[in-house]
Image (cartoon, helix red, strand yellow):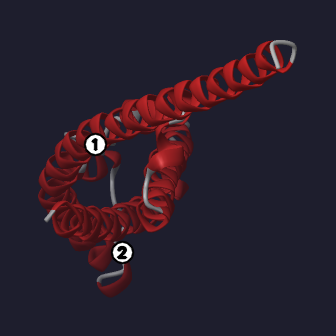
């Protein structure tokens, strides 16, 4: 009987050790899960503030670029309707303040991806964020490229190209306004979704 008792205690002790390890691992996993969720929530709050700032910037630029588009539209009408050659002075007076490209912040999204916080976002939220940040990046890079190309053409001072430049700048201004309106809709849609998601 005494010989079996140490074996029983040994088995019982092993069961307690295994049970303790399982409880410890489970507790550790629960702590990690809470930490990940807290990190995801913090990232989402940062992203929301970042997108509100970007939204405000876009909203301001829409008004500015609409005015620029109207000014260029008047010159374009002179080219088409009155068959008038536009001077460089007319062109540069119309776009004297130039185009303004928003410097969209995307730090929150990049940080959420780098830290893995995005892995704990709702799938729909993550998909919408991914689309929104892609649109931001594409919009900024695309518009900068178009504007730089046209300014380069304008710097060649070829009088035959001025009418073409006026029309080109008009279409760029129109394109910018359209993209900004699309961005504004995306921002509004996402911010509404986040508001509903929180409540």
- In this view, the residue in front, 2 or 90, is 2
Q: Is residue 199 left or right of residue 51?
A: left
Mark 1 or mark 2: which is in front?
1
- Image vertical order of residue 170 relative to residue 5, above or below: below
Q: Quadrant of the N terminus?
A: top right
Q: Is residue 110 left or right of residue 183?
A: right
Binning the other alpha carbons within 10 Å of mark 1 as few (below 14), some (14 to 19) or many (20 upward) gives: some
Residue 27, position in %: x, y?
Answer: 47, 30
Q: Which of the 4 image quarters holds residue 74? A: bottom left
Residue 96, position in %: x, y?
Answer: 21, 41
Residue 76, position in %: x, y?
Answer: 32, 72
Residue 168, position in %: x, y?
Answer: 47, 63
The residue at 38%/65% (across/down) is 179
Give me the disc on residue 79: 2
The residue at 15%/54% (across/down) is 64
The residue at 34%/35% (across/down) is 105
Q: What element carries label 2?
A: helix
Q: Which residue lies furthest to the bottom in this view?
A: 81
- In this view, the residue in front, 130 or 116, is 116
- In this view, the residue in front, 190 or 91, is 190
Q: Which of the 4 image quarters holds residue 171? A: bottom left
Please give the residue where the numbered disc 1 appears in the rendered image. Answer: 100
Q: Is residue 108 left or right of residue 154?
A: left
Q: First in sequence: mark 1 or mark 2? A: 2
Binning the other alpha carbons within 10 Å of mark 2 as few (below 14), some (14 to 19) or many (20 upward) gives: some
Q: Quadrant of the C terminus?
A: bottom left
Q: State the separation of the CA atoms marked 1 and 2.
A: 25 Å
- In this view, the residue in front, 193 or 165, is 193
């Amino acid at each position: 009987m005494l010989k079996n008792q140490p074996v029983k205690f040994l088995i019982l002790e092993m069961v307690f050790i295994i049970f303790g390890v399982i409880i410890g691992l489970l507790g550790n996993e629960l702590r990690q899960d809470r930490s990940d969720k807290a990190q995801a929530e913090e990232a989402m709050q940062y992203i929301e503030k970042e997108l509100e700032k970007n939204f405000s910037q876009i909203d301001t630029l829409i008004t500015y670029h609409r005015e620029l588009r109207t000014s260029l539209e008047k010159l374009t009408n002179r080219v088409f309707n009155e068959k008038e050659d536009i001077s460089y002075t007319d062109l540069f007076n119309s776009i004297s303040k130039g185009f303004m490209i928003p410097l969209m912040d995307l730090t929150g999204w990049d940080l959420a991806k780098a830290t893995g916080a995005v892995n704990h976002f709702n799938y729909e939220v993550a998909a919408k964020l991914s689309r929104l940040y892609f649109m931001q990046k594409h919009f900024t890079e695309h518009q900068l490229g178009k504007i730089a190309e046209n300014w380069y053409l304008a710097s060649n001072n070829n009088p035959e190209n001025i009418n073409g430049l006026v029309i080109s700048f008009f279409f760029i201004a129109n394109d910018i306004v359209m993209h900004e309106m699309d961005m504004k809709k995306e921002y509004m849609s996402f911010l509404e979704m986040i508001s509903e998601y929180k409540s």
